[in-house]
Amino acid sequence: RLEPSLLTHAAEIAGQHLPSVTVVPALLELLKHTSPLVREGAIYGLSAHESEEVSAALRDLAGGDSSPGVRTAARDVLEAR
């Protein structure tokens, strides 16, 4: 088990370097993590992977996550597309 601060960085790096088929399912699961920091890392990891499933998950977070930072990160990634 990684601490949230390490897991968030791992999610971002994995998203930047691994193919969608490998990394997207794992990052989508991390969007459900209890730590907002980890959810943000997963969002940034997903930023390089465009699909309807990813976009829908980001829209859900942008509109309804309990963390303002997560909502902002999701909106930022969606706006950059």
Image (tube, helix red, strand yellow):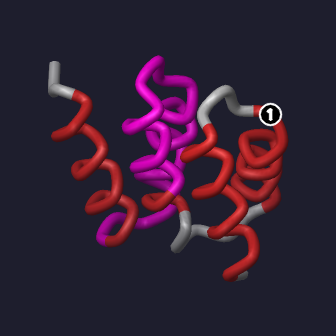
| SS label for mark 1 | helix
The residue shown at (34%, 58%) is 12
**68 w.r.t. 50: above or below:** above
Q: Which residue is mark 1?
A: 64
- In reply to whether residue 35 is colored magenta, the answer given is yes
Image check: 30 left or right of 73? left
Q: Quadrant of residue 16?
A: bottom left
Across and down, in percent, residue 33 comes to: 47, 23
Looking at the image, which is closer to me, 52 or 30? 30
Please name the amino acid that badge 1 sits on.
Gly
Q: Residues within 10 Å of mark 1 (few under 14, many from 20)?
A: few
**Which segment is the magenta one?**
17-43
Please tell me which residue is depicted at 16% across the width and 26% down the height of the picture. Answer: 2
Residue 34 % position (x, y): 47, 18
Vertical order, 43 against 31 (above or below)? below
x, y (%) of residue 62? 76, 48
Q: Tell me which residue sits at (53%, 53%) in the image.
A: 43
Residue 34 forms part of the magenta stretch? yes
Name the chief secondary structure element in magenta. Answer: helix
Looking at the image, which is closer to me, 24 or 37?
Answer: 37
Residue 23 vertical position relative to residue 38 in the rendered view, above or below: below
Which residue is nearer to you in this view: 27 or 69? 69
Direction front: furthest residue = 68
Q: Which quadrant, please, contains the N terminus?
A: top left
The C terminus sits in image quarter: bottom right
Name above or below for residue 29 compared with residue 6.
above
| Relative horizontal placement of residue 30, taking residue 37 as reference (left or right) | right
Give the side of residue 65 with respect to residue 42, left or right.
right
Residue 50 spot, x, y in % from top left:
67, 70
